[in-house]
Amino acid sequence: MKGHFRRFLAAGVMVGALTTGLITTLPSITASAGAASSATTTFTWAEAPQTPPNFIFPFMGLQFFSVSNINTFQFLMYRPLYWFGNGESPTLNLGLSLGRAPVYSNGNTTVVVNLKNYNWSNGTTVSAQNVMFWMNMLHAEKSNWADYSAGALPDDVKSITVNSPTQLTFTLTAAVNPYWFTYNELAQITPMPTAWDISTTGAAAGSGGCSAAAFGTSDTQCAAVYTYLSNQSGYNPSNPDATNNSLSTYATNPLWQTVDGPYHLTKFDASGNITMAPNPSYSGPVKPLKNSVFKEIPFTTDSAEFNALVSGSIDAGYLPTQDITSSGSLSAPGANNSRLSNNYNLKVAPSWSINYFPYNFQSTGDGGNAGAIFSQLYFRQAFQILVDQSLYIKKINKGYGVPTYGPVPVKPQNSFASVYEENNPYPYSSSKAINLLKSHGWTIKAGGTSTCTNPGSGANQCGKGIASGAKLAFNLQYASGSTQITQLMNAEKSSWAQAGINITLSQASFNTVLGNAVPCSGASCTWELANWGAGWIFAPDYYPTGEAIFQTGAGSNSGSYSSATNDANITATNTTNTSLTTYENYLAKNLPVVFQPNPVAIGEIKKGLKGATPLSTLQQLNPENWRF
């Protein structure tokens, strides 16, 4: 989502992360699965509207770096080295991890990783060499990894030694903060099977030369393997804008059938109709129910998903905000919609995320003025001040939301959010926003389009690079299919109009908006503002230090925000035990993005379905734990 991972889905239900406590009951769960009848049990889960998965290879650029591709799709087949999420807590879960707790030594410059006994579905062992495969791929293709940030993985790794099939030693270039390195660096790694180490169809496993090489010595071979695997996923690195024509092969391509997760793919189409069957070789502590299938069901609108809930045709879904009939909050949920209350239990949870949408600081839109305007802090302050988060949470989200005032989540409760951020540095005030623009050379036309009438970079002027007559008129593309997002965009458009900031709204699918809002430069870099429906979920950067999204040149820094002060603040949090306060307070004041209210996930879980709660704050799915 994803970090993040990733760009995440505000409307998507977050279901099923196991708690450490549940692990102690696994023998009885496994036994009940073994005693199950021969009848097939089907579990169904609702995808968020117009957000079908569209990438299967777990090494991807920003345009594919989403919850719908990773947390609720790839993770079911390909397990990361370390699993995070203990119930509603976004913490390390060693019980569900492939690796044991990392061991730090030599002044936090050496890290030893020991693997548990896991197998791939083709009978081979998940080994240290599979971890090296991913690290060599990252070394060769870091510009194509969405979570890359300069100075972090792989730049901070001097060497990696494979000590045995189950142990690796990372030697780092300098001391690190162990918490950060575990939560944000090792967390990125997804071991890849040797069967994928090929550069042509039909080649022998490992013939690509990427997995067995010493760290960083096989960039040419790894680049060829990356190109082959990306093309098999439908992404052509030589033609990144080409249509993905491989989606129909995901369930039949032998490559993707080599899995170490609880499921393997049996059906897949471009619309998002997905069927998975249990992986009989899964080595994890919780095995999927025998003779079961898991289906992900796509919807074009949230209203269509609600109708499916009314009919009882899905087991786990979400309640759209327009169908909330009793206002509530995270701490005090209201009653369920009466049309669903007989069949479903309503569950709510915050996500470990912040909600925002980016400015494109390099944009040549608005007659060449957009990027220059966005670069002015006073403009970003005025724009943010007109976002009335508390009102939108009350009216649009019916109370089911938490504000975003900076780069660190304020919910779930955590020790990272500062008092400055929690107290909202930019409370709503239309008069203050208007005065800010007036005092910087803009003639305000409320309800119309304000213009720069005092150009220049001095006091009381519009700012460097902003031409006389420049307009506060911008295009904002946002994700379609969600009534809540549409209502929010229209409410914000009206609010910005009070200061003569004229926003032209347009809609596109989630995947389209996500693919358009990427770093760019030059004459073709014309996108201005983009809202894919929410902001960023902190995964695999579970420690919210922000290097993946706010550091200069980072892979998921969509709008190309850059600040030397911020970069230095991030480096301090990554290399020492420095608290996040200086970093987060600076960005809460400097406004690298437009912060928005963060909707609370409102899950609808069919009565009698066990193991789907508590809802995951990381929006992960664990249907292997589901039982009726």
Image (cartoon, helix red, strand yellow):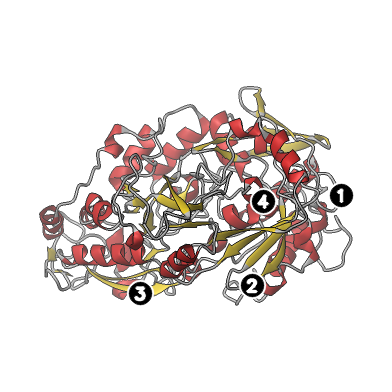
Q: On the picture, is 279 further left or further right than 406? A: right
N-terminal-most mark, 4 or 3 = 4
Front-lying residue, 489 or 503:
489
Q: Nearer the viewer, residue 376 or 498?
A: 498
Q: Quadrant of residue 386?
A: bottom left
Residue 340 visible in this rendered orientation of the protein = yes
Which amino acid, mark 4? Leu
Which residue appears farthest toward the top when viewing the image? Answer: 106
**For the residue labelled by badge 3, is the local secondary structure a helix, a strand or a loop?**
strand
* Depth order, front residue of 6/83: 83
Q: Cβ–Cβ below 8 Å for labels 1 and 4? A: no
Q: CA distance from mark 1 to mark 3?
A: 49 Å
Looking at the rendered structure, the kind of residue marked 2 is Asp
Mark 1 — residue?
123
Q: Which residue position is annotated with label 4?
A: 138
Whether residue 145 is visible here, answered yes or no, is no
Q: How far is mark 4 from mark 2, CA to CA?
A: 29 Å
Q: Earlier in the sequence, mark 1 or mark 4?
A: 1
